[in-house]
Amino acid sequence: MPDILRINQLSAGYGPLRVLHEIDFTVSEGERIGLVGLNGHGKTTLFRAITHMTGWQQGSIKLNGEEIGGTRSLGAGRRTAALVKKGIGVAPQGDAIFPGLSVRKHLECGAHTKSAWRNRRQRIEEVFEVFPPLRNLQHSLVGKLSGGERRMVSVGRMLMSDARLYLIDEPALGLAPKVSKRVMDALWALPVNGAMIIAEQNVSLLSGRADRILGMHAGRMRGDIGHVDLN
Amino acid sequence: MDLGLIVYALNLASIYALMALGISILWSSVGMINMAHGATFAASGYAAWIVTGALKPIIIAAFGKTTLATIIIASTLIGSAILAGALCGIIIYLLAFLPIHDKPNYPVRSLIITLALNIGAVQALLWYFGPRNRGLPKIFGFGRWEIWETKIRYDQAGVIIGASVVIIATLAWLRFSRRGLEVRAMMQNYEGAAYCGISRQSTALPVLMLTGALAGMAAALLSQTIFVSPTAGVIPLLKGLAIALLGGLGSVGGAVVGAILIGFIEAIVGAIPFLGQRYVYFAGFSFIILVLIFRPRGIGGLLDATRE
Amino acid sequence: MTKKLYHKVGRRPWEYKLKPDGSLARNRLRLPLTSRHWLKWRDEYNPKTLKRERRLDDKKPLWWSIGLLAFVLTVPFLSNSLISVAAIFCIYASINVLWTLIIGTAGIFSLATLAVVGVSGYLAAASNVYLGLPWPFMLLVGPLVGFLAGSILAAPSTRLDGLYYALLTMGVAEICRIYVSQLRSLTQTSGAITQVDSFIPEDWFLQRPGLLLGFAGAFSLLLGSLLLWRLINSERLGLLLRTAKTGREDEAFAEAVGIDFRRARLMVFVLSSSALGLVGAFYAMYFKSISPTIFSLDQLLLLFAMMVIGGLGRAEGATVGAAIVTIIDKGLIELGPLRIILVAVIMLVVTIFAREGLTGARDQFRDFRKRKSGERRAQRTEKGGEAMPEEAIEVQDKQELFYRRFNKRLRERLKSLITPALIAEHKADPLGHHSDNLARVLNYFRRGEMADKYVIMRLKDGEERYRIMAVSGVRGLSPRVVDDREYDDLNDAYHAVFILRVNDLMES
């Protein structure tokens, strides 16, 4: 059984700025991984490198044994849609929502695989089970929703497709503690048949619940930092 | 004001709406101003002329001069025009979209490329077919209906009904189909759409084919009243561009409303005795300018803000 | 050991440098009646070759002068038709240069250039034919009409956005055309005004001397528009407008700084419109007539194609593009509509591949090359490693570079030596007899500089309580606490220091 994600010597950056320096790590099936690091140290760039949205990248990325990385110095975002269809679900930093579409339309957009589209009504119901407040907001325009609700829409949209690897970037960013707790609880409660990587600055939200917590510093992977004891 | 004038106005409005809708949808979803719309119009007209010219004798021979034959001829005419329009859309996709859509200064460069395509295509048609006008077979017949003491010609009614059907079908496709949803999502957030498996290329191609087909339909309908010639597409292009701007680039409702307004204005001005046909163009144009001065974003320029 | 590749970085384009004799004084040509110099010479002392060097900072005046001089000297020896083609080229090129002022410098996407030219030409011709003004006054009527037309057209330009304004101007041109072709007084000539007086005498018209005179007039027109371009673009108005070039952020910044760019844009627009009016009057005089074809969309698109092929926004682009398209259009007239197709194809290819047109191709290539080498350099950069060549040039003490290289290699070697077995060996006996590898690692650590070096501090004399600190390396600055673990055994403390130093080594 191949690992879900195996990254080998990945470097990436934007123009003359190099952000990631030779990253190696592996994610096995069923793992929930927390990625911790300060702002600007490469967490988001790592996710973007997996989906080919950085300026350039170098190094091998294997998804389910299939090579999706490689050396590239142009065309950020050109292959993103094709890669996402191979089974990556992304909830990016800042939500990337469509202001003029309703919540229901967002969820329908997320169902981009054929099987997901066919079962979309059922899946939408499942997402409403995970995030109950969205049921009442089904037909409201997402451009008018609050930050927490948008976060729920973004994560819900990610859950609609049959993704093997979930990349969630800073789910608690900009949210009130109660709301962020609800979002995180929902994330941890999900049954994961692939793997999940959650990037967060706040270690306390991940400790005790993640299988592994990896630290990133200055664009390098610092390895397993174990579980941090809070005093 | 008699019904005949209204019918005439709606006749004009239908064709303008087809052209303006194509330009408006294309701009808001692909970000391209298509100056080659006129060339698509003319090329579809010629394609329809060639196909019907080749097939008409066969159909007449098979079915005689019956209504069935007329219907078949009509469908070949409209079908070939729409297909040719979609084909032109594919060519525009390959030349004006794919090479430069993620490079800098894309809107201006796509405008220039489509302009070059327009110039080249018109000259190519001129060189290949010659400057003479060509006639297309009449598909609606020459009869008239009498409703409330006004005579409505079959072809006027056909144009209005045909255009409305196509426009409603287009709007329904945009609103209810998966591809239409993808197009609307891509318009609003490129990154989010990419994470939903929607790529620019996969949305641009159907939209370009659709707008090409719209221009083809307009050519098929307009060919009932005017002849097909290489420069036949210039005036519909300019009018379509003006009306799309009037309605606000990106607002499909605005384009339809604008087309109806301009159709009525042109009909009314044409009917007023001392102004006559010469001032039709001038009147429509001044109206557009007046509206744009007071509402610089056009009638329905709400979606335009999202584009920026 | 792999062979290190030394890459070229920051390649400067090769320049031709003169070697002046130090004794001669510099001789710089002045433009007559001004205090401006024709060429920008720059003298520098080269410390490597110990000689003075002179080079040209801006080569553009040189290329312009050579080009224009070659042009004006060869044309009088060509055939009659070619002279008229050259004159037409001059007229189109002047229109394009002035149009570039409007589109490039002022940033107003106006398609009314030919409308302004046509209207001024028509009014100037009408004033001559119907009002009897002698022909020199046409050269006054033209700019006046251009000024008025420009003022009228300038008003909506602030209010309407780019494309809307383009449509407005396009419509204005169409209206002029329809209006003129439907004027009752001109219906016999289908809208044209003929028999206009001109600076070309009647009996010379269409003869060689007339053609040469016409060409001379057209060439001075071109020189005049280039002069106007230079005066506006490189002087105050152009510099002001350059701050508000691209998009909203620049405009907001310019406004905040106090630059009234809107007024500058209007001024440029009106000035170039007046100049276009002059071109219109000249056009009427050169052809001795003026017809509605000057308003046609095809003519406008052809001029636009010239600008695009040459490069939007540059005067040399306008001229080069005009040359190319005029040669194709008027020189290959046998091909019929095919030549326009050729122009369209060239326009297509240039827009897809050369972002700034033909004249901008060299800069585009240089940007591409710079970006590529920057990316490759970024992929090779490591922190604290060997100095990159561009950094090495700046460092004064070259021994520093050798030291860094040596250190880098040493650290790589030591990293390969550190194994769990080594760490266990140290833990077992921090101060005892060590293996060769451990001894090398320890020697390296002990040799480290004092800044931030880990030390063990005994908390109280006599007690066996130790803490790890790091000394600052600066006289008078106390050491900093690393962490607050206390060690009871000195060996544990030694091992902890070793682990810290190993971590730092692995991270670097």
Image (spheres, rainbow, N blue to C red):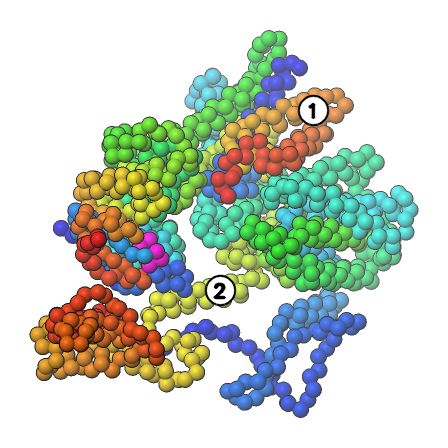
Residue B170 locus on image (x, y percent): 45, 29
Q: Spot the residue most to the bottom.
A: C23
Residue type at tag 2:
Asp
Residue C272 locus on image (x, y percent): 72, 53
Residue highlighted by disc 2: C367
Q: Which mark is residue A190?
A: none
Q: Quadrant of residue A89?
A: top left
Q: Locate the C terminus of chain C and report the quarter of the image it occupies.
A: bottom left
Mark 2 lies on a secondary structure that is helix
Determine the chain carrying the residue at label 2. C
Q: Locate the N terminus of chain C and report the quarter of the image it occupies.
A: bottom left
Q: Which mark is residue B269?
A: 1
Between C219 and A45, the residue placed more toward the observer is A45
Instruction: Residue A41: say if magenta.
Output: yes
Question: Are marks 1 and 2 in one subunit?
Answer: no
User: Which segment did they paint magenta?
Assistant: A39-44
Left or right: B263, with C114 as reference point: left
Type of secondary structure dominating the magenta stretch: loop
Q: CA distance from mark 1 to mark 2?
A: 56 Å
Dot 1 and dot 2 residues touching (CB under 8 Å): no
